[in-house]
Amino acid sequence: MAATVREDGAGGQERGQRGCEHYDRGCLLKAPCCDKLYTCRLCHDNNEDHQLDRFKVKEVQCINCEKIQHAQQTCEECSTLFGEYYCDICHLFDKDKKQYHCENCGICRIGPKEDFFHCLKCNLCLAMNLQGRHKCIENVSRQNCPICLEDIHTSRVVAHVLPCGHLLHRTCYEEMLKEGYRCPLCMHSALDMTRYWRQLDDEVAQTPMPSEYQNMTVDILCNDCNGRSTVQFHILGMKCKICESYNTAQAGGRRISLDQQ
């Protein structure tokens, strides 16, 4: 009864083989959308032209006795443990990672629960050390990662909160830092650049501009504080007079020779 269904979605998986690259579990999910069996929703979505709705899963198949049964933590036929952790809302089976189901997020998160709080404005579970210390953006997790353009809210990859409040996948954030330091959405510095700015101060002081540029000024806009100021032009960078960041851009306005004023 089970073997014929197994061939649909889990054809390469032998009887008794536990889990997949995504989860450690002792059962296959019967997809309510196509009646095929897959180890998890991600395996299903990677092989089908539609997505599996985890909340609509009603039945699973034991990997040992192959009995199809109602979704539950232990096989009713052979007592195989389908998952050390089981959520009867998300139908998530996995080894114990201190998971918990967040009613506000609507899905399970990796805990422990006491290390996280749910920010109602961001609509996301965040580490306790960010409580009262992050910039809120309404429903920020419902936006896709601006680097890979994949979903953040339901992703298995940890989200990284930037100082500006925007989110990136942690892996995308680490890759971004190899090429630059600014948020791809708002251009705010993605980490504390203070030490680098002070090093740049020294480099600017040690690098005099040619005489024809020494008395030139330029209007700049700071990407970090959003302030505008007029500063002396320098090829290495132009420092914001308000917050002393070099994360600035020329804001129109022509350069003016001081000795012409």
Image: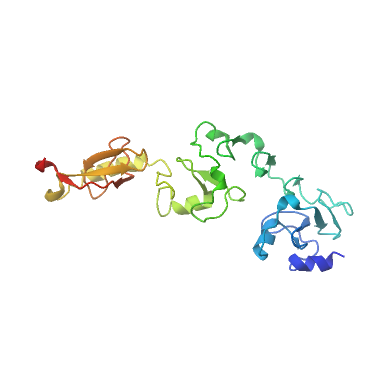
**In this rendering, position of residue 106 left or right of residue 185:** right
Residue 29 location in percent, x, y?
A: 76, 57
Residue 52: which quarter of the image? bottom right
**Looking at this rendering, what residue extends furthest in the left direction?**
259
The mark tally for this picture is: 0
Residue in view at x 67 percent, y 56 percent: 22
The quadrant in which the C terminus is found is top left
Residue in view at x 31 percent, y 43 percent: 221
**In this rendering, position of residue 51 left or right of residue 212:** right
Query: Colour scheme in the image?
Result: rainbow
Residue 147 location in percent, x, y?
A: 49, 54
Residue 51 location in percent, x, y?
A: 67, 58
Residue 206 location in percent, x, y?
A: 21, 45
- State the residue in front, 145 or 16: 145
**Looking at this rendering, what residue extends furthest in the right direction?**
77
Residue in view at x 55 percent, y 46 percent: 159
Q: Is residue 130 in view?
A: yes
Q: Is residue 10 in view?
A: no
**In this rendering, position of residue 124 left or right of residue 74:** left
Q: Is residue 49 above or below residue 201?
A: below
Q: Is residue 12 above or below residue 216?
A: below
Residue in view at x 32 percent, y 40 percent: 245
The quadrant in which the N terminus is found is bottom right
- State the residue in front, 128 or 155: 155
